[in-house]
Image (spheres, rainbow, N blue to C red):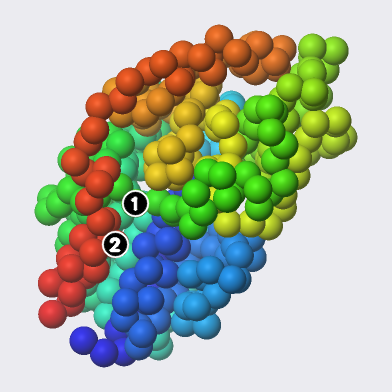
Amino acid sequence: MSNIKISAYISGHGFGHISRSLEALSNILLLRPDWSVRIISPRGEEFARSLDDKGLWGRVKDRFSFESEKPDVGIIQRDSLGMDLEATKSEIEIFRKNKESFLDKQTKSLRAETPDLIWSDSSSLPFCLSSSLHIPSLFLGNFTWDFIYSKYEDPIFRSFSQELKEEYENCDLGLVLPLSCPITSIRNTREIGLLGRKPNLDKESARRYYGFEEGIQYYLFSFGAYGIDPTQFDWKNWDPSKKRIVVGGVEWKGENHLGLVSIPKCHYPDLLRACDFVLTKPGYGILSEAYFAGTPVLYTDRGDFPEYPYLVKELGSKFNSAYISHNNIYSFHWDPSSRKAIENQPKPDPRFEKNAIYDILNFIEELIS
């Protein structure tokens, strides 16, 4: 199969969707040198600018193009640890009003582009396009938005959930990642391996590369697109002679403090591997990357997000991990959770060891043949 073109619609909810899809699509382009991808996402170009051009991304980036459009609503966040459901309802109403305009614009683009496949992570609206234009379609994700919204009692969420369910039913094939919620609105699904970015360096080399000191514990703060508020911390309890806070460039907003290590542009999985712990809200992206990096996870509450209990269940059984409360984060009371994370004994999962890239590529070639 030559000169295959993929139009990929990626959710702008956080960085997890664009991170894993760009990883998968980049590896696919490496394996198929005459394929190309158009990314339609509010996060696509923003995320790509943060990537290290020396690695995989630098070898394939010329075969990507980007269009900043919003294919779904997601959940509006007040910050990384709190949701704003009232604002989300308002965004749903705006999205509904703009839906036909979005579909008209994308229909024209797709007719001009003539892609061989429509890829969605994890929006439902692209499947209206694939159905009307008779283009094969693929879902990639660990949850569907109809499931997420169905867990809220408000009539706006319930009716929107039903709309999305009907849109997902147009999908030709759903590729379901590990760490998943129940996916019932896509009729034809296949389970695939764990997908996520992987480190290029071993632990010792990564620590040396980032200049980490011996005898110091490094905690990576991974709170994605929304960051964490440093004014909430009780800085009188902070001892930078024993610990360092590491951020990848977007997680820290405001005044810097002694013991803060900021590395704005890097191969994030290498930074993750270099650290002793990652302190985060649970989301698919950071958990998959922490698994591949072998870095223990300290996780905290993220509000009433329906994916949360499914991820926590997997954290308890498959990761070196432990819960840490918001209060203990902000007061720097990290040691008890750190010890529990190291002591937790995860059980191996065969799906975590499968090669998700080959799974996805094989299913694509079956779908478009």
- 44 up-or-down from 315: above or below: below
Type of amino acid under label 2: Ile
Query: In this rendering, is residue 323 above or below 16?
Result: above
Observer-nearest residue: 23 or 80? 23
- Give coordinates of residue 276: x percent, y percent: 57, 31
Does 259 sit left or right of 197 as displayed? right
Nearest the viewer among 110 and 242 is 242
| Residue picked out by circle 1 | 195
Q: Quadrant of the N terminus?
A: bottom left
Label 2, on which residue? 357
Q: Residue at x 35, y 88 (%)?
A: 34
Q: Residue at x 59, y 49 (%)?
A: 206
Q: Is residue 310 visible?
A: no
Residue type highlighted by circle 1? Leu
Quick check: marks 2 and 1 in contact, CB under 8 Å? yes
| Residue 180 point in image, percent of width and height | 28, 37
Label 2: how many residues lie within 10 Å, few (<14), some (14-19) or many (20+)? many
Is 123 situated left or right of 64 in this image?
left
**Up-down relation of residue 46 to residue 349 (above or below):** below
Within 10 Å of disc 1 (Cα), the crowding (few <14, some 14-19, many 20+) is: many
In the image, 289 versus 205, the foreground residue is 205
- At x 46% / y 20%, what residue is drawn? 341
Q: Quadrant of residue 331?
A: top right
Secondary structure beneath label 2:
helix
Identify the secondary structure beneath mark 1. Answer: loop
Q: Nearer the viewer, residue 72 or 343?
A: 343
348 to the left or right of 156:
left
| The C terminus sits in image quarter | bottom left
- Quarter of the image for residue 110 reads bottom left
At 40% from the left and 81% from the top, the residue drawn is: 36
